[in-house]
Amino acid sequence: MNVFDIKKQIGKIYQTTKQYFIAKTRKYTQHIENLKIFYTFA
């Protein structure tokens, strides 16, 4: 493994992690929005 390979691996992991967190955050935000709507009409 040279430095370039290592950087590539880190980049891949970083992208995957970022995608994962974006998806999780979006889900969470959606959940909060749903709760807001629910409480508005309740």
Image (cartoon, rainbow, N blue to C red):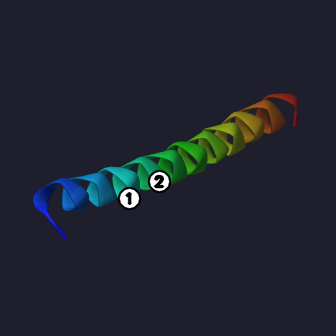
Q: Give neighbour class at mark 1: few <14, some 14-19, many 20+ (Cα, 10 Å).
A: few
For the N terminus, the image quarter is bottom left
Q: Residue at x 54, y 45 (%)?
A: 25
x, y (%) of residue 3?
12, 59
Q: Does 13 appear above or below 25?
A: below
Quarter of the image where one finds residue 34: top right
**At x 87% / y 30%, what residue is drawn?**
41
Q: Position of residue 29 (x, y in %)?
A: 61, 39
Q: Secondary structure at mark 1?
A: helix
The spot of residue 42 in percent (x, y) is 87, 37
Labels 2 and 1 touching (C-beta < 8 A):
yes
The span from disc 2 to disc 1 (Cα, nearest Å) is 5 Å
At 41% across and 47% down in the image, what residue appears? Answer: 15
Residue count near mark 2 (Cα–Cα under 10 Å), binned few <14, some 14–19, many ≥20: few
Q: Nearer the viewer, residue 5 or 26?
A: 5
Q: Quadrant of residue 33?
A: top right
| Location of mark 1 (residue) | 13
Viewer-proximal residue, 41 or 37? 37
Q: Which mark is residue 16?
A: 2
Residue type highlighted by circle 1? Ile
**Residue at disc 2, secondary structure:** helix
28 relative to 22 in the view: left or right: right
